[in-house]
Amino acid sequence: MKQRFVSRSQRGNALAYHMIFPTWLTIVVVHFIPISIGIFISFRNLTRYNISNILSTNFVGFENYYKSLYSMKSDFLSSLSVTIVFVIFTVIISYLLGLACALIGNSKFKGRTIFRGLMLIPLIIPSVVSLTCLRFMFQQNGIINYLLQQVHFVTDPIVWLVGKNTFYVILIGNIWIRWPLYFSVLLSGMQAISEELYEAASMDGAGFFQKLLFITLPALKENTFITTILIAIWSFNDFNVPYIMLGGGYTAVPDAANLVAINIYRKAFFSLDFSYAAAQSILMSLLSLSLILIYLQLRKKED
């Protein structure tokens, strides 16, 4: 009887496969199976009336996708426009705020360590806690209106959590939980820049803005781009900010703050039009995937 010999590399590969199997199983159960079910539902006519038997629902093809993209009264397109504006302002303001604080945190002054720690507080505190506190601050009798009245900026309290003002509320909430990531990434990038570059620039007569434009920002290009893609994707898929700050529910989130994720939630759990909501979810996922593909393509060109 021949004895079978197994090489050390083969044993190592077998061990590696056994160790990653739970991870792959979790990914399949948590991601691929729900996505597959969502794709299946998006091509059916699943509503509150036939939810008891999904397999017996009628096949409607791309009707739900057509209704989302080409209908004159498409709530998906209106919520998508709100979401795009929401993402753009979040990225721009978060970047500028993070860059300014990173420049301050990278300079030498007494108490610099304390300043850096304070800037990371929004990143450390759970977003549910931060957003709930902000929600109470923006109440009609909250501290925001109190301060505005004390400095005579307004005479009557502003109703922040109703109507068009809700967009500014959720924008501030999203910026509050996103900008510290820019701060930490940009600060770590600044610390990796050689001081000799700044010294040489100073000898050539370069000022602060010249150093910023020609040394600091180019060196932070890679860090900035990766962080921007991440924050854009997170903001595009954001559900927690409007839901927590505006209290959730169908009537609590007005059209001004109706992000795509909230709109899908409304269609699925209030209108109970599950197929329409599933189609919008797939479209939302494809748009998020496009951001990742753009990032990978740009990285490929740089390499």
Image: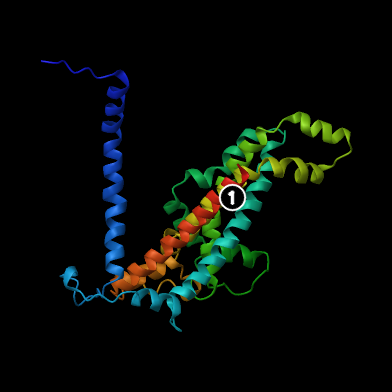
Judging from the image, the colouring scheme is rainbow
Q: Along the horizontal axis of the image, is 56 left or right of 272?
A: left
Image location (x, y in percent) of residue 138 = 52, 64
Q: Residue furthest front?
A: 1
Judging depth in this view, the residue of 196 and 108 nearest the camera is: 196
Residue shown at the point (14%, 16%) measured from the top left: 2
* Residue named by callout 1: 298
What x and y, as percent, mark residue 55? 17, 68
Q: Residues within 10 Å of mark 1 (few under 14, many from 20)?
A: few
Farthest residue to the left: give it. Answer: 1
Residue at position x 77%, y 29% in the image: 196
Is 54 on the left-hand or right-hand side of 218? left
Residue extending farthest to the bottom is: 72
Which of the 4 image quarters holds residue 276? bottom left
Location of residue 13 by image quarter: top left
Rendered position, 55 above or below 93: below
Residue type pointed to by label 1: Leu
Left or right? Give the position of 161 relative to 109: left
Between residue 283 and residue 297, name the one nearer to us: 297
Number of numbered discs on residues: 1
Residue 295 in picture, x, y percent from top left? 55, 51
Q: Residue at x 51, y 73 (%)?
A: 256
Image quarter of the C terminus? top right
On screen, residue 213 versus residue 259, left or right, reads: right
Q: Nearer the viewer, residue 11 or 19?
A: 11
Where does the image place residue 135, in percent across and percent down from the top left? Answer: 47, 61
Q: Kindly tell me whether residue 179 is visible in this rendering.
A: no
Observer able to see residue 66: yes
| Residue occupying image coordinates x 10% and y 15% | 1
Judged from the image, the secondary structure of the residue bearing numbered disc 1 is helix
Above or below, 78 relative to 21 = below
